[in-house]
Each structure stands twice: as structure tokens, then as C-alpha cells.
Amino acid sequence: MRKMRHIHIAAAAALLLAPLSISSCTAGGDLPCPIPEDKMNDPDPDWISFTVVNESCVSFCSLLVAPTRCDDWGLDWIGIDSLPPGEQWTVKVPAGRYDLLLEDCTQLEFIWEKIDITEASEFEVTGEVENSAACGNSVTVTNNADEAVCYMWIAAPHSESFGANWLGHDSIEPGAARKFLVPEGTYDLKAETCEFDLLRIEMDVDISGEVYWLVQE
């Protein structure tokens, strides 16, 4: 995946950054481009911890970190997991200057460049609670089916496909419910079992305020 130097401005306006304990540096990391998968999974013990904290009202399904000098983003650090509001994800990299890409679960991209990482640090992504449309709107999925919902897609109108699974490794067990925060708008919703059997699909669902969506066989 080659780097793309753009950002969806309208969506990004609801997100602010508060990087903590990140000092300036001029040298880039000494990793090859892109970062090899074995180094992502088994980093050197003396590398630096860089933690992305999601304090926004948006769920992220992709997190990519690459040395600023690289033209290729490489692999997604969170894989099939997701980074919902209130959670965090830590990567380890050698000291250097990096670019960060977060993709929300509706496939909108947010990019920050030239982040200097010289010591263990946190990078906080927050939402302007009073102004962010995402913070006041949600869809609560209640599972009244006999099987667990393992795949939940909430696709925005701009999406060319249903995108990423909002549940990651989680599931909505029979009789349980899960609340998803989303910006106000119209979405396509789809729920499937762990075997990808379709439980429910509905197109053009208006989400404004609190919306409840029932899954049943």
C-alpha cells in the first residue's frame, strides 16, 4: 500500500491530536521500507513504545506506522482487530521520524506526518465532544438470533464495499447488544455469523441520535 498524502478534511475536523512526551529529532528510523512483518511481530527489546490512544467517538479498523522517508505504508499493525473508542494500541519502533495513518471502520483515512519518536510516548486522538457529530449518534445492535454475530459492517455512503468488520475479534452473543458510535448520516448495515452466514442486511439506514437495530432469525 503506497503512501497517499491526503486526508478527508470534513471528517478529520472532528478529530484533534494531543501527542504526549514526543520530542523532536532529525534522524529517521533505520528500518527498511516497508517495515518487515517479523519486526512488527517481534520487535527488538530496546525499541521504543508508541501508543495510539483512541479518545475519539470513532472506531478505527486500520493503523499503519511507517518511517517518514518510506513511500510504502506496509502492513496494518492491528490486523483483523479494531480500535474502538476508549481503547489503545502500542507498537514498538526504533527512534526516528514516522508517519501515522488511521482508517476508521467506514474507510475514511486520517494521516499525520513527521512524528518524532525518541522515547516511550502516547499519541492521543480525541474528538471535540461538544462539536463532533459522531459523539451524539449511535446504532445499538441487539442480537436476538440463536447464533453469535461475529461480523458487523456499518458502511457509509462513500464506501465502495462494506469495508472492515467493526467487531474485530469480539462478537455479540445471543441476547446481548453492542453500541457503535458513528457520525450522523445514512449507512448500510450487515450482520453475519462466525461462519459468514447472513443474519440481517439493511440499506440506507438513517442514523441520527440513538438508533436501535434488531438482529433475529
Image: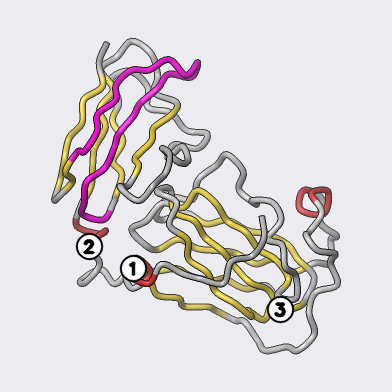
Is residue 182 magenta-colored?
Answer: no
Q: Which mark is residue 97?
A: 3
Would residue 8 be found to the left or right of residue 99 on screen? left
Q: Nearer the viewer, residue 121 or 160?
A: 160
Magenta range: 183-205
Position of 159 relative to 71 (above/below): above
Report how far apart the C-alphas of labels 3 and 2 lie in the structure: 32 Å
Position of 80 relative to 69 (above/below): above
The residue shown at (66%, 55%) is 1
Would residue 200 be found to the left or right of residue 151 on screen? left
Position of 120 relative to 53 (above/below): below
- Write down the residue under mark 1: 127
The residue shown at (41%, 56%) is 86
Q: Secondary structure at mark 3?
A: strand
Would residue 20 be found to the left or right of residue 85 on screen? right
Neighbor class of circle 2 (other Cα within 10 Å; few <14, some 14-19, many 20+) is many
Is residue 187 magenta-colored?
Answer: yes
Q: Secondary structure at mark 1?
A: strand
Q: Which mark is residue 133?
A: 2
Which numbered disc, 1 or 2, marks the residue that appears first in the sequence?
A: 1
Q: Number of marks in the image?
A: 3
Q: Point out the frontmost of discs 3 and 1.
A: 3
User: Which three-letter amino acid code belongs to the residue tagged 1?
Assistant: Gly
